[in-house]
Image (spheres, rainbow, N blue to C red):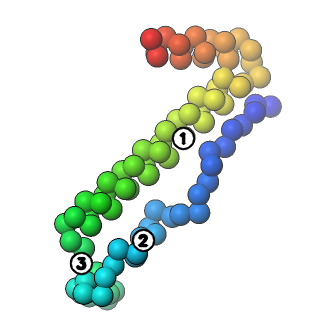
């Protein structure tokens, strides 16, 4: 039975948008029957950069979890081999 390490879960969803930067003078349009706000280019760049950072953190967490699960395997020889392989990849 391997020791599974699970990544930290946050309650934020990918489709959640922070509306704290919205101001009252933001123009609103209707798109496919829904009311949407048009973002300025600087706000759009800021949201895009934040989304990339969040995605990068989540991918790093998942990557580290997979490597940790391999190392913590019950098969000692397999764990030793995977540690040597990681050492070679880092060097």
For residue 27, the mark is: none
Up-down relation of residue 70 to residue 46 (above or below): above
Q: Is residue 61 left or right of residue 29?
A: right
Q: Earlier in the sequence, mark 1 or mark 2?
A: 2
Q: Earlier in the sequence, mark 1 or mark 3?
A: 3
Q: Position of residue 14 (x, y in %)?
A: 46, 62
In three-dimensional space, the C-alpha distance between marks 2 and 3, rounded to whole angstroms, equals: 14 Å
| Mark 1–mark 2 CB contact (< 8 Å) | no
Q: Position of residue 21 (x, y in %)?
A: 35, 74
| Image disc number at residue 61 | 1
Q: In the figure, 87 relative to 37: above or below? A: above
Image quarter (top left, top right, bottom left or bottom right) of the C terminus: top left
Q: Nearer the viewer, residue 22 or 72?
A: 22
Q: Where is mark 3, residue-wise?
A: 38
Mark before the other along the chain sequence, 2 or 3: 2
For the view shown, which residue lies furthest in the right direction?
Answer: 1
Residue visible at 74% across and 18% down in the picture? 75
Q: What residue is shown at x 62% (from left), y 45% (from top)?
A: 7
> Image quarter for residue 66?
top right
Q: Which residue is mark 2?
A: 18
| Residue 31 appears in the picture as rendered | no
Q: Secondary structure at mark 1?
A: helix
Q: Position of residue 89 (x, y in %)?
A: 46, 15
Q: Mark 1 against mark 2, which lies toward the viewer? A: 2
Count of labels in the image: 3
**Residue at the image position 38 percent from the left and 56 percent from the top:** 51
């Amino acid at each position: 039975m391997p020791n599974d390490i699970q990544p930290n879960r946050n309650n934020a969803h990918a489709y959640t948008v922070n509306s704290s930067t919205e101001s009252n003078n933001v123009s609103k349009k209707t798109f496919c029957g829904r009311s949407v706000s048009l973002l300025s280019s600087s706000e759009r760049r800021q949201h895009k950069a934040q989304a990339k950072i969040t995605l990068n953190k989540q991918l790093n967490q998942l990557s580290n979890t997979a490597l940790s699960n391999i190392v913590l395997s019950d098969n000692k020889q397999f764990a030793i081999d995977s540690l040597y392989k990681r050492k070679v990849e880092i060097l």
